[in-house]
Amino acid sequence: MLNQHEIMQTIQMIDQQHLDVRTITMGISLLSCAHSDVKAACGKVYDKITRYAEKLVATGEAIEKEFGIPIVNKRISVTPIALVAAAAEADSYVPFAQALDRAAKTCGVNFIGGFSALVQKGMTDADRVLIRSIPEALATTDIVCASVNVGSTKAGIDMDAVAMMGRTIRDLAQRTKDQGGFGCAKLVVFANAVEDNPFMAGAFHGVGEPERVINVGVSGPGVVYHALQSVKGQPFDVVAETIKKTAFRITRMGQLVAQEASRRLDTPFGIVDLSLAPTPAIGDSVARILEEMGLEVCGTHGTTAALALLNDAVKKGGVMASSHVGGLSGAFIPVSEDEGMIAAAQSGTLCLDKLEAMTCVCSVGLDMIAVPGDTTAETLSAIIADEAAIGMVNSKTPAVRIIPAPGKAVGDMVEFGGLLGSAPVMPVHPFGSEAFVARGGRIPAPMQSLKN
């Protein structure tokens, strides 16, 4: 039973330390919407989403009001559209993206994810159509998010898909240049993508998931930062234990919200994703947690070790607080969404190479990073290949969400607003990777793939 002290602690975490439920995400299977006629298929997609998610936003708002717990986003994820649209004979899947956009707006959610393809071992005709459709689809819709899985520990890395994604990102940036290349903020390239991720832009509803499901993502970097202020100068054993206990409390709140949303929506509870997801707000930064451990600036020597400790302790604490932990679950390091990361990048301490090293030990990859607008498609593809290799060899889920900001150079700022924040344009290496990317084919799966 909760005592008065614990109740006051929770109120303080919400009021002063930015504790919130970052998202309630309803996953919906669209496999039953496949149809040979594009218009008919899009109609079925719209009808099914609006029927299943009709009460999602109202339910989230009611829980928020009754429990006093901020629920920042209500979102929808759907079956990868390349699978649903494959039955239709079409040379563009933009109509499917527009149907998703209309359905999401009717339901009142913040984003809808699942304009996606899974191509880790090769591309079907439908996968190629979907990838070619991404630039127009994301440029002509408002809240649709896309993702492409180009590699896995079991399959290796599809370098043909990696090359396509470099060109796709360049095209999308140009189509949304009036918004600073904002379309690229709605596109994620994965390796080892998970089927139950509630966070955008990479959420999709996997084929192994039920007809519909409720997944919840919690967040609380500010709470962890505040907790570490009470153990200044103490050994790392104490630091890890403090983070574990804090992650447990954060995740219990997410479990409560997930179960209540599941009950009210008559939809199975899937998972709680216990990732620390920062925002641009002061006091809600993962970078500041690492600095509280003793780093002068995030990105200096010791940053990767500090992040490894944080990521591990969050998982250990959170997994004891929920019956089902999933998604990505760890620490996110999106540069534009974290005021401490922004400051570190502006100071020159946090660079692309250091971020890549950090992604070896945390939940995601190179996330919300702006690079010069003249960065070539081949360089973007090579960056994706590097991250996919980290995921493939280490059996983790890295992602690349990178914005070649049109007309911007190193040192400029790109403003996205809201939770997406602002990104300092970071330098890339001046030497090319064209011949490397042009080889194509598939990088074989590592020895770690042979588990049986």
Image (cartoon, rainbow, N blue to C red):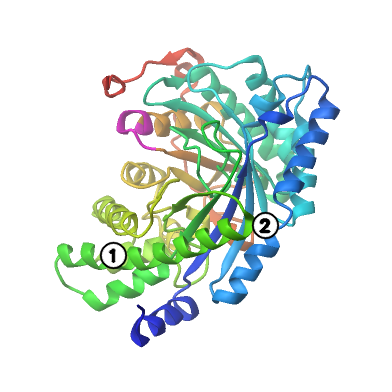
Q: Which residues are magenta?
A: 390-396
| Neighbours of disc 1 within 10 Å: few (<14), some (14-19), many (20+) | many
The image shows residue 104, relative to residue 135, as above or below, that is below
Q: Quadrant of the C terminus?
A: top left
Whether residue 244 is visible here, answered yes or no, is yes
Q: Which mark is residue 56?
A: 2
- Under mark 2, the amino acid is Leu
The label nearer to you, 2 versus 1, is 2
Q: Residue at x 28, y 67 (%)?
A: 245
Residue 57 placement, left or right of 231: right
Residue 132 placement, left or right of 230: right
Whether residue 299 is visible here, answered yes or no, is no
Instruction: Give residue 170's quadrant in the image.
Output: top right
Secondary structure, mark 1, is helix
Q: Residue at x 59, y 50 (%)?
A: 267
Q: Does the magenta-highlighted stretch encompass residue 432? A: no
Q: Residue at x 43, y 36 (%)?
A: 429
* Residue marked by disc 1: 243
User: Among all residues in the image, which is located at the extreme right?
Assistant: 39
Position in image of residue 322 (x %, y %) = 38, 56
Q: Quadrant of the N terminus?
A: bottom left
Estimate the spatial distance between the alpha carbons at disc 2 and disc 1, rounded to whole Å.
32 Å
Q: Does the magenta-highlighted stretch encompass residue 395? A: yes
Q: Are marks 2 and 1 in contact (CB under 8 Å)?
A: no
- Closer to the camera in the image, 212 or 343: 212
Position in image of residue 100 (x %, y %) = 74, 41
Instruction: Give residue 372's quadrant in the image.
Output: top right
